Image: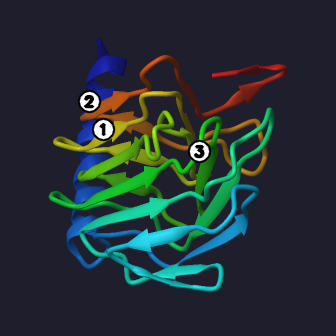
Amino acid sequence: MFRQTLTRILTTISTALLMGAASCGLAMPGTGTVVTNPYGAVSVQGGTLNGNTISNLQSNAVIRLGSTAGSVGSLAEIVFQGLNLAPGDTLAIRSGAPGQSVVLHNSDATASSIVGTLQTQGGNGAPAPTLLLLNPNGIVVGPGGNMSAPSVLAVVALSDSWTVGQPLINNGTVDGGTALTHRRERRGAIMY
């Protein structure tokens, strides 16, 4: 009982802190860099794309992957300096062809706060891409927050040591469609 009460208190505090961070100017993801992209030209609606740099994302932004179909093990990776969504903000990742996967990686020193909507969508007749959200500093989906990836969603808060994870808290909606996985620590060969 003590552990459950402590967990509720820590969850409430963490969520409040991260929601406060989102309301203090951390509404949309910071600058992102497309570091891996086997799918062809990426486009951005509601933001700026300059070379491989994504910036100035607005509250209903869409990142569209290129028109090259994915193959086994292929993925696009976008590294953001801060990955937060405030209430009312939506970031959609749209496929440009079948078989695509994308990794969104938060590389700053803070946990991600999702109290808006992060989703994947199908495009050009292709199913939605699979999504891996990675933040070694933790991930909180706050009340009203929504993460949705109908093809597959993986949420990972493993730290750099691979033995200790950071908070992975869901007080909203997390929907992985056909498969949902979450990882916050690794013990031996088993991840939790």
The label number, if any, that marks residue 11 in the structure image: 1
Crowd around label 3: few <14 · some 14–19 · many ≥20 (10 Å): many
**Local SS, label 1:** helix
Crowd around label 2: few <14 · some 14–19 · many ≥20 (10 Å): few
Give the mark, 3 or 1, whose residue is nearer the N terminus.
Answer: 1
Q: Nearer the viewer, mark 3 or mark 2?
A: 3
Crowd around label 1: few <14 · some 14–19 · many ≥20 (10 Å): some
Q: Which residue is mark 3?
A: 97
Q: Quadrant of residue 52?
A: bottom right
Alpha carbons under labels 3 and 1: distance apart: 39 Å
Residue for point 63% across, 68% down: 41
Q: Amino acid at mark 3?
A: Ala
The label number, if any, that marks residue 28 in the structure image: none
Q: Amino acid at mark 1?
A: Thr
Give the mark, 3 or 2, whose residue is nearer the N terminus.
Answer: 2
Find out whether the residues at labels 2 and 1 contact each other: C-beta distance under 8 Å.
Answer: yes
Q: How is the image coloured?
A: rainbow
Instruction: Specify whether 176 is left or right of 10.
Output: right
Q: Is residue 73 above or below residue 160?
A: above
Q: Quadrant of the N terminus?
A: top left
Q: Which residue is mark 2?
A: 8
Q: Amino acid at mark 2?
A: Arg
